[in-house]
Structure formats: structure tokens, C-alpha cells
Image (tube, rainbow, N blue to C red):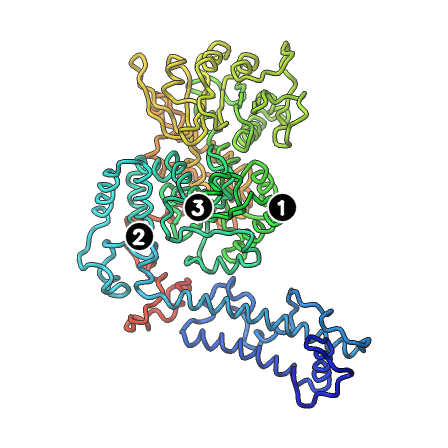
């Protein structure tokens, strides 16, 4: 805002005197020259973006609406783009900085407001241009080498020759090796590793190199590999995460320093079609406590099961870690620790950061992107679920996934215990996320079966925490425990503080451990259960993970009960033989629930995950337990059946989503076949060319440019 025609100053200004801007405003008001100049600059920026996109052969229709929202490149004309100048944009500009020495006239005030709006909108357009330009550069600058570095873009030595010639010439050895050979070779190397942690690291190295080989191995050898990529080995990996970090991008990390920049961070992720996000803040990793940024291993492991168990394509998956510090002081002081070196943030910035991540994810990936909250501390877990369950397609796996898993085991156990769900009396050891989540879903299922109010259904469910039995006489209960604070049973004058005492007084038919306390179910507890339970085969579910935190082992529970209890564990455990009967414990792992639930959400475009989804999950899983499993005392299917279980469960949940009106996609002709059709199969991923429609063109692949220049020629899909 300068001009040789500036009028004389009212007084001699200093270097930061506001009258300098006053005189410049006079020029704007009198001549309008600077306004036209500023508008010309804005038009030049927008034109540059338009010309750049044209030069790079990227039609506006190929840009995602989320990256071009400010410029409206998808639907509006070039003239409409210029109208953004007149649109108010939020900013920090203050008219106080334009104060005049004397009281401004109405005309001068109008000039102030115009200048402020022009400046804010100029900054906004430049920012939008930067985002769009970064998107163009990020996607169009990929060479064949860049795509080889993306593990979802090739099949390593199993990549067909005609695709190598088009996209990867010179980057792979000339020989073709079938996928099954690559998988067998990988498994041979895996089995040679001496420790589970080394096997974990090997598998993640494989994943960093080629997702197809990694997931083909997991799909074919699920029972062998699942304990290595998930519990119990993932617990060890998280403890050692700061030591075994692989220096490869495997998810996004957000801290309070990123508030205001979350959208920019999402643009840095190479995949644009994200459908499932697993989000953690690392405060309660399994039963291991606060591991801070080391908790990223859980998010990665969960998403690996989405793909291996339910066929959710890895390019649709995004692990997210919210780093707000850690209260684990020894870890925080370790020089190798990679997170914020501060106590855990619990103030407004925490809520602001989580809210911005969820809003940005919905804006970029759509309202139906599925968000799984994982391993948050009790306080934030319940708060975030309550806050976002009606605002986003989300669920908490520790509260709701665990609940569906446990309810399924109870339903499936009826042939072994002789009791239906409504006939049980449950005692929980542990009253945190998992305990209260299971208790609430059990109560909902009981209320549904008995057609009684929820309050009445809760009367057969008792909780025990670190201070003893939860009951109506306690004044120290947090909100999520209060619904289960019952009056003490008749004849009981003092609330038990020890588990064995509580078992004798409550006389449960089902003892469920979610405490993370190793060996909490000791021999006196099991003996009390067998002596006072009204059934000969009570339930004993030791669900805490990893194995080092389990309340007891299968061998102990079977030995102390002479093989009478119906046992299930969260982590895999070996069976035993008692009196000639082979007993195989069922694995009550959430992996039977959340992958199929996620697949159903993708198949229907779900806008919400309601309680009915979890009830359907439990019922669907329970009915898939075969008689041969029950004959060996198992109330869950074997892990090798998990992919078939996920398909059936997803079809059942998808039906509920359509019936409940929370599906945004039209009902298909055959729902189950539709679910199967969207599943990713790593062994046949290269049977068609859709993978290569995701590859940005290499500058060297000139002969292929013409055929790939118009994405609309291939059904209008986005290929960039």
C-alpha cells in the first residue's frame, strides 16, 4: 500500500506508527489502486494453481474435494474461484492495529474493514493453493522408485512382467517368483528367529517392504502369526518400541504442537482413500500401563488384523498416535524415548487436538470413515466414546469390542454350563473400561431376553475393584461403576475386600477377570468358586492381556477344578489332558469381533456404530462355535477359522446396519456376496489392473501417458 501520491502526514510517524497505515488507507479509499492490485495478486495465485494443474495434466475432477475445498475446483468455474476473495475467513487479524490517531470517519472504518478482509482472504487463498499444490506434487512426482518404496503398490518379485515394464522397469530382478514361494520363503526365515520379538521385527520389516507378501503370510498362517503381530508379542514390542523403531513411516503422530496443522499432516500420508483409523494415546496399553508414544505398536497391530482377518485393504488403514506425554517417568527419561518428554497433558489442548483429528479425518475421508479408539485411559476412554458416538462412525474396542467378545463366550457356553444368559450370576474382577463395558453389554442382552428394564437386568452382575466389592454403601465410585453398586446380599454385613471372600458371598456362576493382575485367580479363588457356585461347570474367563497379565493360565484353572471349569483367555494358551479328556481353551480375543465389524461398516457405509451392532456381533460369533470346539471345552472358534468368521459376522452386522437405518449405501442384491467382494486377497491382488490405476505415472513411462491421462476412461475412479 504505497504510492507517490501519498498526502502529507498529520504528524511525523515512527517506524511502527499506525498513521503510516492510516495514510495508506487513504490511498485505498481515494483511488482503489491497492485493492485492485491485491485482487490481481489473488487472481494470479489462483491462475497459477489452475495452470500448474493443467501443465501436470491433472484435471480438476481428479482432485479430492477435501484437498480442493477452498478453491472448489471440482464443481465451480474459474470465475467462481475468484469469489473466495469476498468470503469471510477466520484469522487473527485485528482492526485495532489499524487505529487512527484521530477518530476515523465511517469511510475510513469501511476502508479498514476492506483491508482486513482482503488480507485475511489473501492468506486463505495462498494457504489453499499451497495445500492443492502439495497434493499435486505429492501424487504426480512419484517415479517407479517412489512407488517401489510404497509397500502397497507392488508385489515384490511376484509383480507380473507387463506391470514391471510399465511401472518398475529396472527396479526388480528379471525373474518372476510366485507369491506362494515368497510366502514360504518368508515363513522359513521367520521360523529361524530365536525369539518372538525378533520374529515380530522380521514381520514388520516384511510389511515395510511389501504388504502383499506380509498379508499373504498372515492370511495363510494366521494361527502361527497372529500371536506375533498382536497379543502377546505386541505387548513386548510396545515395551521395547523406542529400541526397535524401524525408521520407516508407519502411521501418523500428533502432539499438541500440531494443533492447527492436522489437515496438513493428513496430506503427508501417501494414501487418500482411508476407511479405518485406529487411534490411541498410549495411556493404557493392554495391561502394561502408560507407554506413551510406544503405544503406536497397538494401533499398527490392530490394523494388521483388520486386513489379515477381514480383508480390509491395507491402503484403507491408518494408525494414529496422539502424543500428549507420558506419566511413565523411567520411560520418559530414557534418551531413546521418541515422544514428548513431559507429564501427560489432560487440559483443554488434549480435547482440542482429538477433536481436530476427528474433524479433519471426516473432512478428508468422509463422514463414514471408521474410527476405533484403542487403549485410552479410563477417564478419556469413556469421555471420548460418549462425546463422539453420535458425531462419528466410531467405537471403543476396549469397552465395546471386549464386551461383545465376552458376551459371545457366555452365549456359546450354554451346552457346557447348562445355563442360559439370564440364569447366570456374574462377578467381575476389574471394574475399568473392559469390566464395565462387558457388564453393560451383558445387562443389555439380559434386558432384551427377559424384557425387563436395564436396572433390573444389572442386578445379577457384580463388580470388584482394587478397593473391594462395588456396592451401594461406597461413596468413592466413579460414574461408570455406579450403575452396578447394589445392596449387599442378604446376610452379608460387611463388603468383601478379597476376591475369595467375594466368591463365597456372591456365589457366581461366571468369574470374569479383566484386572491385569497376574495370578489373581489363584488356587483358593478357584476352590471357593467350585465349592460355592450353584453349577458344576462355572465360567472362568481370564481375559487380561498379554499372557504375563492374565489372571491365571488354562493349565492352572483346569488343574485346580479337575477339568470342570469352562475356561477362556484373552491371549492364546496351550491345552491340557485330564483323565483322558483333551481340553483346549478358547481364545476370547477381540480379533473375532472388530475386523468383521469394520468390514460391515465399509460394506454399508455406516454412519454410526450403535449398541445393536455389538449385540449382533456377539450373537453371530456365538453361533459359529462348532460342536467339535465345545467337545474340547472351547467357547470360541479356532483362530484358523477367523477369516470365515469375519465374513459371516460382517454379513450379520451389515444386515443390522441396513435395518437400523445407519447404512448410507444402497442394499445390495446379495449382502453376503457383496461383503466378500470388497475383501482384499493378497494372493490375487494382481489379477486385475486396479492396483496400477493407483500408481502415479513415471516421467520415464512416456508411452503409457496417453492411456492413463484421463481417469474418466476407467469408470470415473480416482487413480492419482
Disc 3 to disc 1, how far (Cα)?
26 Å
| Viewer-nearest of discs 2 and 1 | 1
Q: Quadrant of the rendered structure where residue 233 is?
A: top left
* Picture layout, residue 392 above or below residue 19: above
> Does 528 sit left or right of 709 as displayed?
right
Percent coordinates x, y for residue 74 in the rendering: 51, 68
Q: Residue at x 48, y 51 (%)?
A: 253
Q: Nearer the viewer, residue 338 or 584?
A: 338
- Asked whether residue 623 is in view, the answer is no
Percent coordinates x, y for residue 369 in the rendering: 50, 51
**Disc number placed over residue 111 in the picture, else none:** none
**Disc number placed over residue 347 in the picture, else none:** 1
Task: Give the residue at mark 3.
Answer: 335
Precedes in sequence: disc 3 or disc 2: 2
* Picture layout, residue 714 above or below residue 355: below
Disc 2 to disc 1, how far (Cα)?
40 Å
Q: Are the residues at dot 3 and dot 2 in contact (C-beta closer than 8 Å)? A: no
Neighbour tally class for label 3: few under 14, some 14-19, many 20 plus, Cα within 10 Å: few
Q: Nearer the viewer, residue 154 or 688?
A: 154
Percent coordinates x, y for residue 641 in the rendering: 34, 35
**Disc number placed over residue 209 in the picture, else none:** 2
Q: SS class of the residue under badge 1?
A: loop
Q: SS class of the residue under badge 2?
A: helix
Q: Residue at x 56, y 24 (%)?
A: 466
Percent coordinates x, y for residue 264 in the rendering: 51, 60
> Does 370 sit left or right of 712 as displayed?
right
Precedes in sequence: disc 2 or disc 1: 2
Amino acid at each position: 500500500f504505497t504510492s507517490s501520491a501519498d498526502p502529507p502526514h498529520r504528524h511525523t510517524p515512527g517506524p511502527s506508527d499506525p498513521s503510516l497505515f492510516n495514510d495508506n488507507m487513504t490511498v485505498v479509499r481515494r483511488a482503489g489502486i491497492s485493492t485492485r492490485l491485491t485482487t490481481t495478486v489473488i487472481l494470479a495465485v489462483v491462475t497459477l494453481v489452475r495452470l500448474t494443474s493443467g501443465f501436470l495434466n491433472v484435471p480438476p475432477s481428479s482432485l479430492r474435494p477435501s484437498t480442493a475445498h477452498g478453491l472448489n475446483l471440482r464443481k465451480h468455474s474459474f470465475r467462481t474461484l475468484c469469489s473466495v476473495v469476498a468470503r469471510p475467513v477466520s484469522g487473527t487479524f485485528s482492526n485495532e492495529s489499524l487505529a487512527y490517531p484521530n477518530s476515523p470517519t465511517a469511510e475510513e472504518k469501511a476502508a479498514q474493514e476492506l483491508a482486513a478482509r482482503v488480507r485475511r482472504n489473501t492468506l486463505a487463498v495462498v494457504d489453499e493453493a499451497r495445500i492443492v499444490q502439495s497434493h499435486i506434487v505429492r501424487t504426480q512426482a512419484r517415479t517407479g522408485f517412489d512407488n517401489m518404496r510404497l509397500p502397497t503398490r507392488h508385489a515384490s518379485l511376484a509383480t507380473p512382467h507387463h506391470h514391471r515394464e510399465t511401472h518398475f522397469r529396472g527396479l526388480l530382478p528379471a525373474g518372476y517368483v510366485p507369491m506362494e514361494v515368497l510366502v514360504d520363503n518368508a515363513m522359513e526365515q521367520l521360523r529361524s528367529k530365536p525369539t518372538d520379538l525378533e520374529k515380530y521385527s522380521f514381520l514388520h520389516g516384511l510389511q515395510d517392504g511389501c504388504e502383499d507378501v506380509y498379508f499373504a503370510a498372515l492370511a495363510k498362517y494366521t494361527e502361527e502369526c497372529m500371536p506375533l503381530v498382536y497379543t502377546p508379542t505386541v505387548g513386548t514390542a510396545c515395551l521395547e518400541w523406542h529400541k526397535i523403531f524401524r525408521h520407516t513411516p508407519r502411521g501418523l503422530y500428533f502432539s499438541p504442537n500440531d494443533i492447527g496443522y492436522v489437515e496438513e499432516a493428513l496430506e503427508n500420508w501417501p494414501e487418500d482413500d482411508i476407511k479405518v483409523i485406529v487411534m490411541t494415546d498410549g495411556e493404557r496399553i493392554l495391561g502394561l500401563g502408560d507407554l506413551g508414544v510406544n503405544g503406536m505398536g497397538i494401533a499398527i497391530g490392530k490394523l494388521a488384523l483388520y486386513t489379515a482377518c477381514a480383508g480390509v485393504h491395507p491402503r484403507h488403514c491408518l494408525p494414529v498416535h496422539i502424543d500428549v506425554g507420558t506419566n511413565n517417568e523411567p520411560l520418559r527419561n530414557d534418551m531413546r524415548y521418541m515422544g514428548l518428554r513431559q507429564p501427560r497433558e489432560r487440559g483443554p489442548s488434549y480435547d482440542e487436538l482429538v477433536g481436530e483429528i476427528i474433524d479433519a479425518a471426516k473432512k478428508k475421508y468422509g463422514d463414514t470413515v471408521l474410527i476405533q479408539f484403542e487403549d485410552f485411559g479410563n477417564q478419556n476412554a469413556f469421555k471420548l466414546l460418549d462425546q463422539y458416538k453420535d458425531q462419528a462412525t466410531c467405537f471403543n474396542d476396549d469397552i465395546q469390542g471386549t464386551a461383545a467378545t465376552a458376551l459371545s463366550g457366555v452365549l456359546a457356553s450354554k451346552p457346557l454350563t447348562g445355563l442360559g444368559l439370564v440364569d447366570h450370576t456374574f462377578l467381575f474382577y476389574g471394574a475399568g473400561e473392559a469390566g464395565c463395558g462387558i457388564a453393560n453389554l451383558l445387562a443389555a442382552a439380559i434386558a432384551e431376553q427377559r424384557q425387563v428394564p436395564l436396572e433390573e437386568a444389572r442386578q445379577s452382575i457384580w463388580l470388584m475393584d482394587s478397593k473391594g466389592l462395588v456396592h451401594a454403601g461406597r461413596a468413592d465410585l466413579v460414574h461408570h461403576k455406579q450403575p452396578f453398586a447394589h445392596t449387599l446380599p442378604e446376610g452379608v454385613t460387611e463388603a468383601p475386600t478379597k476376591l475369595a471372600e467375594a466368591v463365597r458371598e456372591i456365589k457366581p456362576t461366571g468369574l470374569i477377570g479383566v484386572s491385569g493382575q497376574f495370578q489373581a485367580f489363584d488356587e483358593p479363588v478357584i476352590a471357593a468358586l467350585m465349592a460355592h457356585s450353584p453349577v458344576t461347570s462355572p465360567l472362568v474367563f481370564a481375559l487380561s492381556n498379554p499372557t504375563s497379565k492374565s489372571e491365571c493360565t488354562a493349565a492352572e484353572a483346569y488343574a485346580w477344578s479337575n477339568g470342570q471349569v469352562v475356561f477362556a483367555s484373552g491371549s492364546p494358551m496351550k491345552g491340557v489332558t485330564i483323565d483322558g479328556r483333551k481340553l483346549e481353551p478358547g481364545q476370547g480375543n477381540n480379533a473375532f469381533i472388530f475386523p468383521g465389524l469394520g468390514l460391515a461398516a465399509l460394506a454399508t457405509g455406516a454412519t454410526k456404530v450403535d449398541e445393536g451392532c455389538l449385540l449382533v456381533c456377539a450373537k453371530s460369533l456365538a453361533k459359529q462355535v462348532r460342536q467339535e470346539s465345545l467337545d474340547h471345552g472351547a467357547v470360541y472358534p479356532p483362530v484358523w477359522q477367523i477369516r470365515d468368521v469375519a465374513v459371516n459376522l460382517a454379513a450379520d452386522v451389515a444386515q443390522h446396519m441396513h435395518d437400523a437405518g445407519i447404512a448410507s449405501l444402497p442394499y445390495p442384491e446379495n449382502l453376503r456376496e457383496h461383503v466378500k467382494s470388497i475383501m482384499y486377497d493378497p494372493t490375487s491382488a494382481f489379477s486385475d489392473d486396479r492396483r496400477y490405476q493407483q500408481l502415479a505415472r513415471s516421467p520415464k513411462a512416456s508411452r503409457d501417458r496417453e492411456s492413463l491421462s484421463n481417469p474418466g476412461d476407467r469408470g470415473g475412479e480416482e487413480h492419482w
